[in-house]
Amino acid sequence: MKILKTIFYLQTLLIVSLTSCAQNNNKQTNQTPTKMTTENNDTLSTAVFGAGCFWCVEAVFQQVNGVIKIESGYTNGDVKNPTYREVCYGKTGHAEVCKIWFDSSKVSFETLLSIFWQTHDPTTLNQQGNDIGTQYRSAVFYNSDYQKQLAEKYKTDLDKSGAFAKPIVTEITAINNYYTAEDYHQNYYNQNNDQPYCQFVIAPKLEKFKKVFGDKFGKK
């Protein structure tokens, strides 16, 4: 029995070590992502975060009270209308990001920043786990002076607090050249949660989110 447990453990480690965002794009569904109404809402704002594979970012922020809609995409690159394959080569300059529409009367940008920094590793340059490349960089792409100032202050305060053993390398820059990712990337975790990447990478992030941000978890 002990030998069987050891074999299972080693097999699990092998799956995790070989699992990355780019290696799990074989299942391409034709399902159209759910569209949510965003009109006629004076308190609607947007935030754009890069924190590794956008499947992970999307899955986390889908759970946040006050988030209305999320879209996976590519931003701040040098190629027009990039494809996922092009971005995965890491030579287009784009970051995998999620654009988040949120009701600022229910959740603040500061709260979203807190969730962002606590659900990925902001100290690893161009890498999150086995996802390696500039497309997986940690980044806040601001769309206003307010977002810029708040993100920079938050980053500075976190560094000073010693919350992380290493310096935070999160990029804070203005958003430009944003492109929506292919349909099969939208709502990815909910449609593919049986995939190894979802089970071994995304699911643990969601569990961490539930424990740390219990009051922000779950739609109301």
Image (cartoon, grey):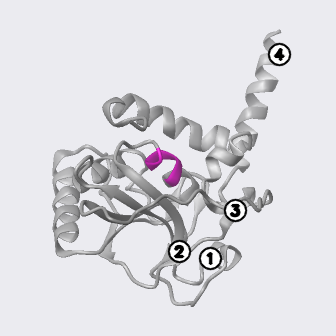
Measure how far apart labels 1 and 3 are at the Cα level.
15 Å
As shown in the figure, which amino acid type bears the numbered disc 3? Tyr
- Foreground: 27 or 156? 27
The residue beneath circle 3 is 184
Look at discs 3 and 2 and give the one toward the viewer.
3
Q: Nearer the viewer, residue 69 or 38?
A: 38
Q: Nearer the viewer, mark 1 or mark 3?
A: 3
Q: Earlier in the sequence, mark 1 or mark 4?
A: 4
Q: Residues within 10 Å of mark 4 (few under 14, many from 20)?
A: few
Task: Compare marks 4 and 3 and give the one earlier in the sequence.
Answer: 4
Q: Is residue 61 magenta?
A: yes
Q: Are marks 2 and 1 in contact (CB under 8 Å)?
A: yes
Q: CA distance from mark 3 to mark 2?
A: 14 Å
The image's mark for residue 219 is none
Q: Provide the residue designation for mark 2.
A: 74
Q: Amino acid at mark 2?
A: Tyr
Q: Is residue 53 visible?
A: no
